[in-house]
Amino acid sequence: MKVSEAVASRKTIRAFKPDPVPRETIESILALASRAPSGGNLQPWKVYVVTGEARAELIRRVAERRKTKALGEAPEYSIYPPALSEPYKTRRFKIGEAMYGMLGIPREDKMARLGFFSKNWEFFGAPVGLIITIDRQMQQGQWADVGMFLQTIMLLAREHGLHTCPQEAWAVWHRIIREFLSVPENEMVFCGMGIGYAEEDHPVNALVSERAPLADFVAFRDGI
């Protein structure tokens, strides 16, 4: 698969088949992804891979906690800016409406929307879950490094016929994650990621998000 094909076919999958992914495949993806750019070669990321009983237990613990904290606790960083301006606010609104529209869940059905959203904390059925952390001393430059590392994982997954779902939603369960996976205090839980084979017939997986045209975000300067 060409890099361009991996980029074009990568999308967030929210319904996975239960088919297992060999550990060797995940190890290969992560080892090669470690070649992602990293300023000063700091490599500020850590990855906790949960499969099998460990994955099931993490999901169970979160489900139990959701009985009293339906949407989790405050994450240790702002997932979105508190006062999101345009055009970003509209983009976020539109992708949410498109997703729930494909699922046939109207805006007024809050419980059904919450029910689907909560599947984040089941990795949307993916058999492999990743929890990604970053050392607390790191700054904006190193957060960019982690983003490039995550993108590299997602593109390499496509090479293996796999799909992914990056999930900052896991950041709201950082206390449970820290306790269950023995994450040291110097590491901040950044996000999770589901990896597996897409359930191609599920309506939510037909969603392809819009991207702004080149003229909206690129400015060419050919002279003084």
Image (tube, rainbow, N blue to C red):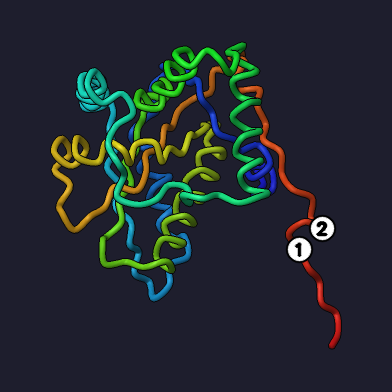
Q: CA distance from mark 2 to mark 1?
A: 6 Å
Q: Is residue 59 above or below residue 169?
A: above
Q: Residue at x 40, y 45 (%)?
A: 28
Q: Nearer the viewer, residue 159 or 69?
A: 69
Drawn side of residue 25 relative to residue 175, left or right: right
Left or right: where 92 falls relative to 170:
right
In the picture shown, does residue 143 fall above or below 73?
below
Residue at the image position 66 percent from the left and 50 percent from the top: 86
Q: Residues within 10 Å of mark 2 (few under 14, many from 20)?
A: few
Say which residue appears at 64% left-offset and 18% top-offset.
Answer: 101
User: Compared to 101, does 163 lie above or below?
Assistant: below
For disc 1, the marked residue is 218
Please, what is the three-letter code of the amino acid marked with disc 2?
Ala
> Which residue is rendered at x = 33% and y = 34% of the image?
23
Q: Amino acid at mark 1?
A: Val
Instruction: Determine which quarter of the picture holds residue 41.
Output: bottom left
Q: Left or right: where does residue 203 sit relative to residue 195?
A: right
Q: Position of residue 116 (x, y in %)?
A: 46, 18
Q: Splitting the image into 4 quarters, where does residue 218 fall?
A: bottom right
Q: Position of residue 100 (x, y in %)?
A: 59, 20
The percent coordinates of residue 14 (x first, y second) are 51, 25
Callout 1 crowding tier (Cα within 10 Å): few <14, some 14–19, many ≥20: few
Circle 2 SS class? helix
In the rendered image, which quarter contains the C terminus? bottom right
Q: Position of residue 167 (x, y in %)?
A: 43, 37
**Mark 2 touches mark 1? (CB < 8 Å):** yes
Name which quarter of the figure residue 38 lies in: bottom left
- In the rendered image, the quadrant that contains the N terminus is top right
Q: How many marks?
A: 2
Residue linked to disc 2: 215
Tell me: 67 left or right of 147: left
